[in-house]
Amino acid sequence: MMPSKHFELTEEDFERFRKLINQTSGIFFDRGKRDLLRLGLTDRADAVGAETLTEYYEQLTSLPDREVELRRLLDHLSVQETQFFRNLPQFDALRKYVIPEIVQRKSNGYRNLRFWSAGCSTGQEPYSLAMAVLDVLPDAESWNIQILGTDLSENALAIAERGWYQERKLTGIDRNHRERYFRESDGGYVVAEPLRRMVHFTRHNMVTDSLPVSIFGTCDFVFCRNVIIYFTHETAKYVIEHFFDILNPGGYLFLGHSETLWKMSAKYSLVEMGDAFIYKKSLPRSIEGRRFIPDRRLRGLPMPPDVVTDRRVEGGRRNVRQAQDLVDSKSPEVDSGINESKSAQADPLIMKARASIDLGEYEKAIELLNDAVKQNSDTVEVHFLLGLAHERSNDLELSVEAFRRAICCDNTYSLAYFHVANAMERLGRFKSAVMEYRNAAKALKQDLPSRWELDLDAFDIDSLVNLCEWKVENLGSMET
Ligand SMILES: C[S@@+](CC[C@H](N)C(=O)[O-])C[C@H]1O[C@@H](n2cnc3c(N)ncnc32)[C@H](O)[C@@H]1O
């Protein structure tokens, strides 16, 4: 719909709108895009009945439901252009070199392949990845393949979830793929079940949310194409650092055709494969053949200047310095303000153990918590944190034991069920994992939405329930 009137964008408003948008999404409007920004703002201001853009700014920053409007605005301003098999040389390289290399490395161990399509828009990228894997993996059913598609746009994600596209959107798909992976529906085409089982979508803002590695796990492939091009250099750099920590050693980062890490990160190696350029997280000799322990800096990674964290994350992101102060403190009666909303977690011992886990000091946390158990304070939180500490140090069997003990103390402690399921999956016991994910979904559905704010970061209970249900489907076909 055409807006009913002309809205002026004053210099002052231009500056504050673009700051707000940059802080909350990473997207940056330079002077050349001023009119584009004005048009986008005009649509939203008109939709909410604001008289001027100054009034719209006030609404956007002071109304109780400002978050909802801010999401709508970001949705409206983000460029969601995408297509199937976009940048074909990269897909050729993926099929010819990259997937075979990772498959060969993993074929004698836990056979899983994990992709993260960050900024997946309406889903064409993750579905193309699913097709590319099936193209080259003849025994795909013996592999656990998971593709996570995330975006900040809820509208784009709704289209991705539905998986229905008009014929004109199928450019890039040849007849063979169309016949195998799409069926005609409602005058268009819908993505077939084998692809859907591999792909899961959830909202995630890569600038303000941290992706909980313990929930989705680390990845072999990150695709973040045609996204950082809209960010400032500083924000792009921050996001790229984050990807490094989420990638498994030996994993690959795919950027868009015109995006480069030049002057941004020297941690990755640039690899030329056919006509494509791809970045690789090198496999250090010292850890070759050993399990990867997630980088301890992940949780406390500093935010780029000025970034505003998502409301749900704000209370949850634990600050590394606060954690360090806590761990260093001699007295258990430290008042740091961390976790102050939860009475049980206000226990100084629990706070200290949590802080040690956040700092990656798992042994220290385990020692503290085991002492607590010996002194008869074996509460649900103590066992849960023991589970987390063991899980992060890759002692999965011990973590399962501890999480089960937490469930014995309190059988409504739903996140413990999730972690048991996750550990079973990582141990390759897929039948048990499926059963445990079912239990976890059931327990989570009965839980309070706010209970796990601190532990879930960008996820909320609903998206975790969806993830469990997807895992049940995704792992259901595995043999063991
Ligand atoms: C141009 S599309 C790229 C889609 C796909 N990756 C491709 O290359 O075809 C950019 C997408 O990034 C998303 N995006 C922008 N900023 C984001 C952020 N901070 N977090 C998550 N997604 C973001 C937009 O909503 C949009 O859907």
Image: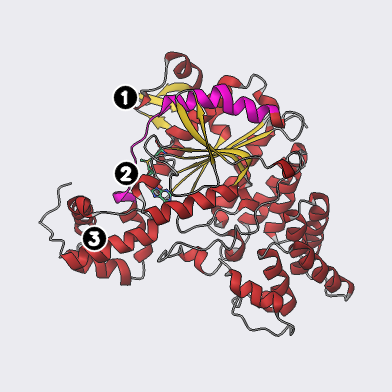
Residue farthest left in this picture: 5
Alpha carbon distance from label 3 to label 1: 33 Å
Alpha carbon distance from label 3 to label 2: 22 Å
In the picture, residue 416 is in which quadrant? bottom right
**Element class at badge 2:** loop
* x and y percentages locating residue 431 in the rendered image: 76, 37
User: What residue type is disc 3 on?
Assistant: Val
**Element class at badge 1:** helix
* x and y percentages locating residue 410 in the rendered image: 76, 65
Alpha carbon distance from label 1 to label 2: 19 Å
Q: Which residue is mark 2?
A: 79
Front one among 178 and 302 = 302
Image point (59%, 79%), residue name: 337
Q: Kindly report the secondary structure that dominates the magenta region of the rendered protein.
A: helix
Image point (46%, 59%), residue name: 208
Residue count near mark 3 (Cα–Cα under 10 Å), binned few <14, some 14–19, many ≥20: few
Mark 3 or 2: the one toward you: 2
Q: Is residue 205 visible to us here?
A: no
* x and y percentages locating residue 304 in the rendered image: 45, 61
